[in-house]
Every structure is written in structure tokens, then in C-alpha cells.
Image: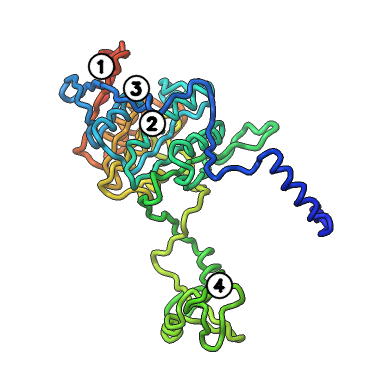
Amino acid sequence: MATGIPKTKQKDLNTLTLRSFEKFNQVPSSTTRLEISYPGKTEESIILEKQELLFYDISSEEVSKHSTLLDNSFCLCDNFYGLHGLINSNKKATLIYMDPPYATGMDFISKELESAYKDHMDEAEYLEYLRRRLILSREVLSDDGSIYLHIGHQMVSHVKIIMDEVFGKSNFRNIITRRKCSSKNYTKKQYANINDFVLFYSKNDNYKWSQPGVTPDKEWIEKEYNKSDDRGLYKLVPIHAPGVRNGATGKEWKGMLPPPGKHWQYTPETLDELDASGMMHWSKNGNPRKKVYLTKDKKIPLTDYWQNYRDAHHQSVMITGYPTEKNLDMLKMIVSASSEPGDLVLDPFCGSGTTLHAARDLGRRWIGMDQSITAAKSTIKRMNSGMEKMGDYVTRKNKEPATGSLFENEIIKTKLLIDSHNDNLNEIIKKIRSIS
């Protein structure tokens, strides 16, 4: 039960609190910047030092220092160097989506039991690994661009601080909770873990944005738009808003003033026009409210809780079989919300290529990166041949063929970024050539 403080004691309490702040200097400065500290944190200037890169082009079988990554291509590489390649070529992405490892301490394998990647970094190593790639991503991002980072519960709080540091706290837009599955069996002494998170940041305040929404169902429409006339269904909304105004919106209209502490949302002249056109509803008590009619394209704006973008959860869902594969409709929504046709969409941890698939379907340019051979295999097969129904967890010999590519004549362009420390180049080239 909450207990109030008597007024006779509030003055003494306020004085004690003020003295406590003064004594310990606890009043924070307006310029305070919160940073996370850990061993091995590197200066940004070192991370951004220009890298001399080599590329092997599968199609031409040539090795070149030419660092321009082609649009609509997949690059098998450590994305630290791939991002440097984009910086060197002055390419800018309007949208970056990344789904990095989550620091789970686990190994991940595909449906065919092929190793996809190992997620074994400790906290400090993981944070610096991700921070370096976020700094490079910031340099690649266009001035009107946005970045979405998909992350699990393990490190979401740590990564939020890193992203505030790299992109600026003022450019934080949302921490989105996504329902990733229906249920979890492991609930011993804890709540079932059914959500993961998406951190949404922009480069600055002037970023591309198209509000995503969902089509309302009949129940919602009947509840919200519960009145009708010969124009259709409508709802009633107030014509005043909080705050006192001294201009026209604070003046008298039809013999009445706005309620205390409020102002009209429109000038008296506009209110007259709304009333004359039949857009005003008058209650029996003479209270005016505006009519808002239901339109055919009405959408309910999406909130920061995404409950309809679960990962594959039944046998008919089309997948590649790559572990941690994300929902295609979710990526299409993100691409639509934060880019326009013709813009470049980048996924530095592209895994099975879901982001690339969404970008291609929506008329965007795209570039994907991953250092996993299994990811390369999944992405190239997906983009060139399509996906297959999930079916049983174990892949059977007599399975249905993959669905056809949406762009039958478009074969994904592949470049292999060569690191000077790569001792298995010939072996990797053979594997890539066998699937491309």
C-alpha cells in the first residue's frame, strides 16, 4: 500500500534531499555521456583505418584490389573487411539490417546437419566484435538511413549502450519486442522465453520512414467506428487539445471557449467549414466533436510489439533450413518502412539471405555478407532456386523440389573477399563454385 508524506514533513524531506545532492555532487551534467567499459576496447580511429583488400570474383576467376562490391551480390567474407570494402568504394546503404550472433555459447547447425557458425565469444570479446562492425556500419549508412539490429535477451542491454555510443542516444527510435515462437518447454524456475528484440536507430532525425500497419479486423472496426450515416462508418474525436493558446485557436467559437487548459485544434474559420460540411457531430448537451470516417486503406499502425512475425513454426512454411532463419514477412515490413525502391539494403550477417530476398522482391538493391560456407550455400540456393517447405525436422531423401526463383533469369553475383590470413582459399573457391 502506498503511504503519503504529510505536508508538515515534506519541507524537511526536500531540504534533506537537496543537501544530500549538494554534498555528494550528484546532480548530473547535461553533457554526461554513458559508455560501457570492457577489456580490449579499441579507439574508433584504429577501427576506421583504411584496409587494403583483395577480391576473388567467381565469375571472372580474377583476383583484384578493386574494392567495389557489386549491387545485388553476396560476399563471402569477414564482414569487418566487407564493410571496409563498402567504405573504400563510397557506397551508402539506406537500410542496414543485421542479425549477429547473440553470445549464447552454442553451436548452430543447418537442417542438413552442416555447421553454420559457433557462438562462443565471451562478453568483452563479443561486445568489441559487434562494436567494430557497428562503427563501420555507421560510416556506410546514408544520412537518411536506418539500422535494425536483431538481438537476444542475453546481451540486449549491453548492446543498447553500445549503439547509443556509436549512433548517438538521440538517434534511438525503438527497442522492439518480437514474439519469436509459440512456447518453450524449459520453464523450470523461470518464465518461458518466447521473445527476442530489435534495436532500431537512425543516422539522424531526417530518416526515411513509411509507417507500417496492419489491416484491422471486423471486431476492431465495430468497436472503433461504431457510428454510421450515408457516408459510411465513422468515429468521434475531440476538437480540442491540451495547452493554452493566445492566438485564434484560443478564441471563442460559436459562443464557447475551449475547455480550461486546452485550445481548439483548428481555427474558428476551419471549424465553421467542418460544421457546414457535415463533419461535426453535436451531442444533446451541445458538445461538438469531429467525425472521422473509415477509409478502405485504413491500417492500424504497428507498435513496438511484433507478435505476428514468428519464425517457421509449422511444416508448410517455406524455409532454407539455415538455423536462426528469420521471418520473411518481417523483413519485408522493415524494408518497406525504412527504404524506397532503388535504395541499397545491406545485411552484413545475411545467414540464409532473408533480407536479400525481401529487398529483391520490393525493388531495392541489396548486398549480403557472411563468412559461413553454409550461409553462402543457403543464400545462393535461395536466391537462385527458391525455398522448400519445412516439413519434418530431419530432411528426407524424397523431398519436394524447391520453389522457383521469383526472377528466373537473375543469378546472384558472388564475390569472395580474400583476407591475407586465409590459408584455405582454393578449398573455399571449390565449395562456392559447386553451389553458385
Q: Residues within 10 Å of mark 4 (few under 14, many from 20)?
A: some
What residue is disc 2 on? 349
What residue is shown with label 4? 244
Q: CA distance from mark 1 to mark 4?
A: 72 Å
SS state under label 2: loop
Say left or right for 361 vs 105.
left
For residue 25, which numbered disc appears in the image? none
In this rendering, which labeled residue sits more in front, label 1 or label 4?
A: 4
Reply above or below: 295 against 373.
below
The residue indicated by pointer 1 is 430
**SS category of the residue bearing label 1:** helix
Q: Earlier in the sequence, mark 3 or mark 1?
A: 3
Q: Residue at x 18, y 21 (%)?
A: 64
Q: Nearer the viewer, mark 2 or mark 4?
A: 4
Question: What x and y, as percent, mark residue 228?
Answer: 49, 78
Q: Secondary structure at mark 3?
A: helix
Q: Which residue is mark 3?
A: 373
Q: How many marks?
A: 4
* Disc nearer the start of the sequence (2/4): 4
339, 234: nearer the viewer? 339
Mark 4 element type: loop
Residue 298 seen = yes
Q: Amino acid at mark 2?
A: Phe
